Image (tube, rainbow, N blue to C red):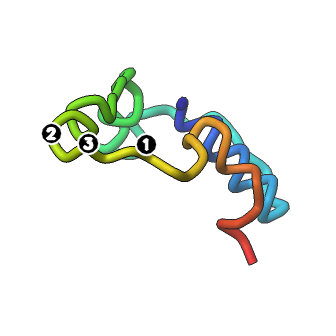
Amino acid sequence: MPVRNIAEVIGGRLNLPTATVPAGDFGFLGGVLAVDQPASSAPTRELLGWQPVRPRLVKDPGKGHYFA
């Protein structure tokens, strides 16, 4: 999920505007946030037999349960 999408959901829930900011404004963290970092729970599922029971991050941020 792009960091921008997460920021837009948080900003929307807090009634704050969002804006594009150059990665360089975040120091070393900007480089981390600017690159695609695909992740998979498959190794954890296989190694530990873990099965997620909550909504996926892609669908979850706007649901409201992160905010009072």
Q: Residue 7: x, y in percent?
A: 63, 46
Q: Residue 32: x, y in percent?
A: 31, 35
Label 1 CA crowd tier, 10 Å (few <14, some 14–19, many 20+) = few
Which residue shows up at 26% across the image and 42% down it? 28
Q: Image quadrant of residue 58? A: top right
Closer to viewer: mark 1 or mark 2: 2
Q: Residue 13: x, y in percent?
A: 79, 60
The disc placed on residue 25 is 1
Query: Rounded to the nearest whole Å, what is the CA distance between mark 3 and mark 2?
Result: 32 Å
Which of these two is toward me, 28 or 10?
10
In this picture, residue 52 sits left or right of residue 1: left
For the view shown, which residue lies furthest in the front direction?
Answer: 49
Q: Pointer 2: what residue?
A: 47
Which residue shows up at 44% across the image and 47% down it? 52
The disc placed on residue 28 is 3
Which of these two is toward me, 50 or 30?
50
